[in-house]
Image (cartoon, rainbow, N blue to C red):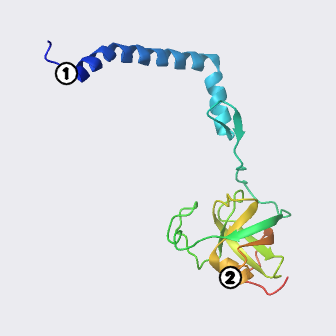
């Protein structure tokens, strides 16, 4: 009898194995670093290539943000609106608080602060919004609009609508227009 419980004896017996395991991990990391595989893994992670549990590569569908928007840039696709009571007051990607009454939008690529004209094909209305958040990440949508922008475009009841996006000109005001 040693006066120790079974748990204390078991922990003492494993103590030497923990040190050996830590040394093995350190040696493995050192070998990876010197072989160049670690930098390859870091580069893959930086460029959006993920790995699954079994090592197969997966592609993350998030294009990088644009540095600037060319004057002739435009985009056509589906828009949705977001900002139920759950998002109200939460921080956006730009750091400001989400305001459902502001004319703002979320876009995956456009630089934060960019003003774009969004034209709803179904209603013929357009509105100028400022990109202050990232998204949408659902389906094949190209932009998420604030509830106020969706209301002014007349797409609030639809949920999703076809839109055309183009950079706003300096003369554009942040008001909805009846038709283009």
User: Is residue 15 rendered to the left or right of residue 88?
Assistant: left
Residue 127 vs 17, above or below: the answer is below
Residue drawn at the location 68% of the way across and 41% of the way down: 48
Residue drawn at the location 59% of the way across and 71% of the way down: 83
Crowd around label 2: few <14 · some 14–19 · many ≥20 (10 Å): some
Q: Which residue is mark 1?
A: 5
SS class, disc 2: helix
Q: Which mark is residue 117?
A: none
Position in image of residue 135 (x %, y %): 66, 60
Position in image of residue 44 (x %, y %): 68, 34
Position in image of residue 35 (x %, y %): 63, 16
> Does residue 169 appear in this view?
no
Q: Which residue is mark 2?
A: 151
Residue drawn at the location 52% of the way across and 74% of the way down: 85
Residue 3 vs 95, above or below: the answer is above
Quarter placement of the N terminus = top left
């Amino acid at each position: 009898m040693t006066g120790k419980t079974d748990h204390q004896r078991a922990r003492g017996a494993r103590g030497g194995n923990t040190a050996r395991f830590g040394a093995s991990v350190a040696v493995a990391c050192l070998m990876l670093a010197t072989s160049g595989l670690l930098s390859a893994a870091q580069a893959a992670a930086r460029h959006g290539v993920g790995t699954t549990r079994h090592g197969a590569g997966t592609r993350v569908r998030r294009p990088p943000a644009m540095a600037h928007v060319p004057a002739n840039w435009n985009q056509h696709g589906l828009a949705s609106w977001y900002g139920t009571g759950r998002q109200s007051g939460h921080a956006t990607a730009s750091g400001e608080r989400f305001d459902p009454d502001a004319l703002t939008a979320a876009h995956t690529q456009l630089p934060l602060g960019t003003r774009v004209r969004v034209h709803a094909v179904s209603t013929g209305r357009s509105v100028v919004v400022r990109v202050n958040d990232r998204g949408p990440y659902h389906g094949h949508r190209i932009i998420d609009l604030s509830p106020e922008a969706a209301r002014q475009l007349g797409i609030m009841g639809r949920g999703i609508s076809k839109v055309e996006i183009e950079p706003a000109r300096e003369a554009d005001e942040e008001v909805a227009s009846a038709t283009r």
